[in-house]
Amino acid sequence: MDNPQEIKREKVRVVPIKYIDDFPDHPFKVVDDESMEQLIRSIDLNGVLTPAIARKKEDERYELISGHRRKHACEVLGLELIPIIVRDMSRDEATIEMVDSNLQREHILPSEKAWAYKMKMDAMKRTAGRPSKENCVPSAHNYEGKRTREIIAEESGESPDQVRRYIRLIGVYFEEQNLDSSKVENETLIGFFSVMAQSESESISGNVKWGIHKRMKNSTYAVQFNMLGYKRGEDGEPYIIPEEAEIVRERFNRFLDGASLGQLKTFLENKKVLTRRGKNEWSISVIRGMLSNEKYVGDVLYQKTYRADCISKKVKVNRGEMTRYLVSNNHPPIIDRDTFNLVQAELSRRTSKNKKMDSAITEQGKYSGKFALSELLICGSCGSAYRRNSKVAKGKTTYYWRCVNRVEHGTKYCKDSAGVEEKMLQESICRCLSKMLEDSQEVYSLIQSNLAYAVSGNSAALDMHLIETQMKQVKQDADNMMEKMSKTEGSTELYEKALSELFEQLVALRTQYEQARAQSEQSESVNAEVQRILNILQNTQISFTEYDDLTVRRLVECIQVCGKEKIIVTLKGGYQAEEELRRNDA
């Protein structure tokens, strides 16, 4: 496409159309279609807004380089003059300019593109194939050391192999049909035979797909096991590799214990575990795919992806466009089904997190695997999450946790929360957990009874809808109340009291909503999760003398910070206990 700034600097001439010749062997056809009609109407109303580009010939005539469609539109309208920019170019330079300017068209036939690439390549080879800075072509660069095909590919946005395929279309002789593609008169026949060949390819592809679908339905289709933990034996059946299977199990367990995908990536790389392609570096998407791969539980899900068509062969994710076939217990599992279901629920939970801060760009929240308290700590006053902060005094760094709502808006919306020094908070959590687990059997029975209550109901979806509606109404009431408070010139005490009650109501509703969502979305995995927690408590020697992120992730559902006085710790399963916020030596 012509550069407007270059056009302004060059002199525009108005010459008679009869003195302008079309470019010899111009590969781009000028078609009288709807687009041409629009161009004709535009020129009829406004004239030719963008001058054509031409070069002067030896016989004092002009050779058109760019603007064949504009010239044709002027001829249809009966115009005798057309504005042009005359450039001093050789034939090869003009060929390169002609191809580059016309490749910007919206609709180009493959045959047109093939001839254009061929003409440009020949012209570049005749001029040593390496445009220099002195070359008058506007898009020229110094391409020393590159092939001509690579230069054309770089400038046109194609791959070098694709450019080569286009050029190979020129001069092909089809022996069976007795057709030569280099002859223009054979183009229609070649197009006809191409349509027939495409139709035949689609028919063959359809037959092949039918056979594949039948084998998938009968669970006889061959499955790829190019994955960590498995290998295919001489009999064609998949077998478990014990050493790799242990790494797979540890990866699943680490994920349930709170490790992020990035931390799993570091774990695999530190273990010097190679990918199936023999690389040391793992990608986050591959790790996420492994965690959701049903083959690790012994199942096979056919047709998770499909090819859109047999021509482009583009692979797409199957989101319901094609039938999927699940074969259960197809081969020996590495991961038990309960653990696998828990991982899927955790994946879903992490990807559906809401943002914690109003200043976040998107509504999607980000999971934090660095600190357990980033996921568990909430404000007992306004229900907002807590985040970790630091301050340096006299060369010593102190870490503390603060309510996000308080940090962003000050005391306007959250008056009762306070920053808690990290060491004191951790000591209080340890004391609370020690007291809660003194009578282990009582705790186990409480967790199990809470679980039974959680999964006994059948109205979770309705509860979620009602609670969500109530939450929206409470938020709207709070916004209205804050707006009224900001406009009043008198005492704000009544407004502050009403806001405090609304925030308490919102905290309660959020707790009910999370319980209902857990019941609705994860009811199948709740039993397995609680059983996992019970096994940890029964089979592991847990010490609460020192704070441990892993232990807290495994046992705790959430921790509410109630001002400067106390915290409320809720175990997974619903058992709660309170603890004062103080140091052990206080």
Image: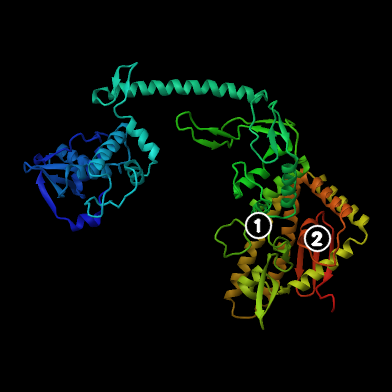
Residue 116: x and y in percent read 28, 37
In the image, is 566 to the left or to the right of 73?
right
- Residue 156 or residue 490, whichever sits in front: 156
Residue 92: x and y in percent read 20, 42
Task: Determine the residue positioned at 59% across, 70% down.
Answer: 483
- Residue 552 or residue 153, whichever sits in front: 153
Identify the element where label 2 is drawn.
strand
Q: Of the residues shown, which amino acid type is indicated by label 1?
A: Tyr
- The answer to whether residue 239 of the structure is visible from this angle is yes
Residue 570: give its label. Answer: 2
- The answer to whether residue 462 of the structure is visible from this angle is no
- How crowded pointer 2 is (Cα within 10 Å; few <14, some 14-19, many 20+) is rated as some
Task: Determine the residue positioned at 59% across, 49% down.
Answer: 283
When the figure is inspected, residue 453 is found, relative to residue 209, above or below; the finding is below
Residue 56: x and y in percent read 11, 45
Q: Which residue is mark 1?
A: 367
